[in-house]
Image (cartoon, rainbow, N blue to C red):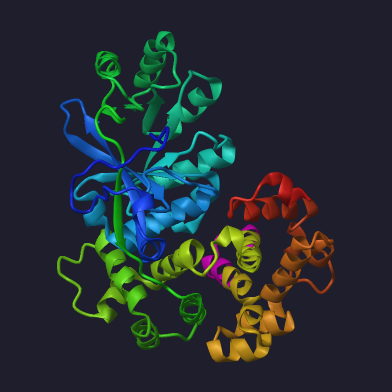
Amino acid sequence: MSERHPVRAEPGHVEVLAQCADSVDPAARAQFVYLGRQPILDRDGALNAYELLFRAGTHNYAEVGDNAQATAQVVARTIGGFGVPAVLGSHRGFVNIDRALLFNDIVHLMPPERFVLEILETVAFDAQLARRLTELRRAGFQVALDDVTELSDELIAVLPHADIVKIDFLQTGRSALAKLAAAVRGHGKVLVAEKVETREDFMLARELGFDLFQGYFFARPQVLAAPRNRSPRPALLRLLALLSRDDGDIAELEAELKLNPSVVVQLLRLVNSSAFGLGRNIASLREAIIATGTRQITRWAQLLLYADGGDLPWRADPLVQLAGTRSRFMELAAGWLHPRDDDFSDAAFMTGIFSLIHVVVGSTPAAVLEKLGLAPQIREAIVSRSGPLGTLLRIAEAAGEGADAASIAASPDAPAGFTALTPEVLAELNLSAAAWFGAHIDETAT
């Protein structure tokens, strides 16, 4: 990413805030969501794309404690808060993304023709990541490598899996720039000079054959503001419960969405952001549901719950973090057991999400789940721990408490195939689930 130190926004487009954070009343500031964007220009100085940046308020610098949550909020605000046309116009948006979200279904909310996945420099490259990047590029995404500073063995290994390379002009020695740029260009990649702060740097980058340019020399990030669309956690949970039911229909989904105008507004923006190829405007909520599809709506509800669901941020809410980590663990374990069964993985995720909802509302699991109308197999898994999902839930609970989860998977009453969840596999899944929330590896291991 192209940020270096706190700056104040320049006056400009009406969407751009010019005041500093101290001049805005905190109560008023809480009514808005914010987003930063910085132009990326071509060799002729024309706008080519924007990098989208997390902003917590009107102050024009990032305050990121959790990369995954920050990215989720950038995506949610771009698609649902502002709308892609308002943020990007006809251009593409570069979005910083960490390893956890690269492997998450949420990434597919972003239309690949409008968003570039900018891989943070902290993401370690390995065979698993290589396979995932291949999948995402086949789905139409372009992959950019962020903050490259040297011609390392790891860079050479990852280049075949990337389309764009952003070279950091502040951190790269001038004597190394020519060799680094030539090597990247030799692999046929688009070269971006980032953190360009002087005319001399810009002229040097042009001479070295860079294709795109970004930095304070051209423009500082702009801060955009939009009224906050509040999506209460109970409403999102009801929506997810309805989406999880085998017998749910469009009429029920339409009725539930009508009770949540803020979600409807964001859903319509989601439709408009995606390449559905309808060739006409959406005239009704039912048309929006059909055009989007229930899987995309589910992803969207999960993203809203993850990014902005409650009064506390996810990282500060231990109950939500437990439910989210558990649901991700169950989804990963289900995918490990049945790689081609997306329905089973989706049901496992939902089971984890709702396994603690009774604590949130202060009731019993049976009473809460009966009102929500969950799919029978999910309800029974939570209430009586029965069936494959019930076994997965018991395994997830044990794994989360540091107990012997593998013995549950290997027990005689476990469903067929569960012995594949060995201690080694469970440890890896537990770590991956914790990483989904940006948790530290040391904290996971304790």
**Residue closer to the observer: 271 or 28:** 28
- At x 70%, y 71%, the residue is 393
The segment highlighted magenta reads 335-347
Q: Position of residue 407 (x, y in %)?
A: 84, 63
Magenta segment includes 336: yes
Magenta segment includes 43: no
Return the residue found at the far top: 175
Task: Examine the rendered structure and indicate whether residue 175 appears above or below residue 210.
Answer: above
Q: Position of residue 376 (x, y in %)?
A: 60, 85
Q: Main secondary structure of the magenta part?
A: helix
Quarter of the image holding residue 117?
A: top left
* Residue 58 visible in this rendered orientation of the protein: no
Task: Examine the rendered structure and indicate whether residue 293 appears above or below residue 253.
Answer: above
Task: Examine the rendered structure and indicate whether residue 157 appears above or below residue 93.
Answer: above
- At x 52%, y 20%, the residue is 152
Left or right of 339? Residue 402 is: right
Q: Position of residue 92 (x, y in %)?
A: 27, 45
User: What is the quadrant of the N terminus in the image?
Assistant: top left
Q: Position of residue 107 (x, y in %)?
A: 43, 54
**Residue closer to the observer: 74 or 329:** 74
- At x 15%, y 65%, the residue is 279
Left or right of 362? Residue 104 is: left
- At x 61%, y 87%, the residue is 368
